[in-house]
Amino acid sequence: MKDRKETAGFLQAAEAIGGKIGALLLELPENLRAETQEIGLRAGRPVTLICGKDVLFPDGWGGVRTHPMEGSPEISAADLAQTLHRLCGYSVYSYQEELREGFLTLRGGHRVGVAGTAVVQQGVVSGVREVSSLNIRLAREKHGCAAELLAGMGDAIGFGLLLAGPPAAGKTTLLRDLARQLSSGEHGRPRKVTVVDERCEIAGCWHGEPQNDVGICCDVLSGCPKAIGILQAARSLSPEFIFCDEVGTREEIDALSQGVNTGAALIATIHAGSLRELIARPQTAPLLQTGAFGTVVLLGSRERPGSIRGWYKAGDLLAQIAGTTAGNSGRELCRTSGVA
């Protein structure tokens, strides 16, 4: 029997979806509810479930298939439009700010990615019409999942941390638990933390209240662009740690450079499927050159979310990028990091 907490997010999302699609999801067995990471709804196509590396299709009889079969439930464009209205509480207008960024946040911190025809005005996306798909990414809280990371970092956490990994490798889940543990004082005294939650994935605020546990001494700037939020946090909230997800634009890099000079430690994430990919990314060198990150941790794959593949000093990676340590393997860099 799965822990009720493991299935609560799925049930919450299924009830929010409602209608015949929600009913279809609620027929699924408990083990699938616990393992599902994403629910995909596409006009004219079957419902999909992402469970680790597997893509599964509900068959309409309480089971799933690895390939859709004839007669598998499909979603009509009308069903999809009705689902979106239901997820918005029948007030799509009130979610326009989020929708023009391609997402909306549900109670519980679940994020709904929205795809369709963009409405562009003066070169800026102002909304979405003719929605063609919805991707519901379930928020998973795993209390304690960052314990190994914090133990391995020790005092080095105060010099900044960049979490690298492929999609669905557990970057946001680790980020969330790091914020919770630091701000709740699970490793010493409680620390002041600010989360710049531009896409409402870390704290998942809904009507101003964090839906995910980010600790007792954590301030959240929800929906705030990272480049603005980092500086706002540093200037106004006096944090010891600033958290944000998926950094890399020129504006964000500039903000990190200024933020690190205020004395706050920066903890952020970047997409990279391997050490080679991380080194090759054009954003990596500018990010590390800010001095905001003393350590870089490379996470595992979708199959093992939250697992750690390697620890690296920022200086070692910069040297590798510059070619001064050409020929070093990721293992060698890891040994010289002095963090693991």
Image: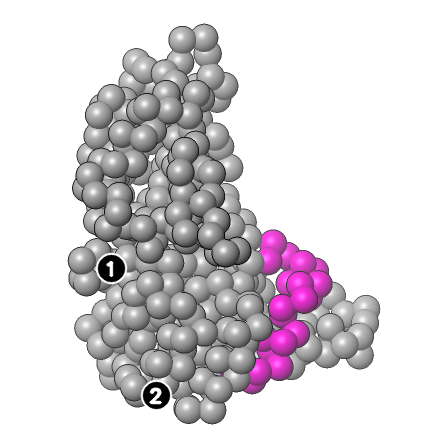
Secondary element type, mark 2: helix
Question: Which residue is located at x 48 percent, y 80 percent?
Answer: 255
Relative depth, front residue between 95 and 211: 95
Is residue 213 found left or right of 74 in the rendered image?
A: left
Using the image, determine if residue 332 lies above or below residue 26: below
* Image quadrant containing the N terminus: top left
- Is residue 180 something one can see in this rendering? no
Question: Which residue is located at x 29 percent, y 36 percent?
Answer: 84
Q: Which residue is mark 1?
A: 205
Identified by mark 2, the residue type is Arg
Disc 1 crowd, CA 10 A, few/some/many (<14, 14-19, 20+)? many
Question: Which residue is located at x 21 percent, y 30 percent?
Answer: 18
The first of marks 2 and 1 along the sequence is 1
Percent x, y of residue 223: 33, 63
Relative depth, front residue between 130 and 20: 130
Is residue 322 found left or right of 24 in the rendered image?
A: right
Relative depth, front residue between 231 and 8: 231
Is residue 284 found left or right of 170 in the rendered image?
A: right
Q: CA distance from mark 2 to mark 1?
A: 22 Å
Q: Quadrant of residue 228?
A: bottom left
Q: Which residues are magenta?
A: 272-292
Using the image, determine if residue 274 lies above or below residue 26: below
Disc sitting over residue 235 in the figure: 2
- Is residue 136 something one can see in this rendering? yes
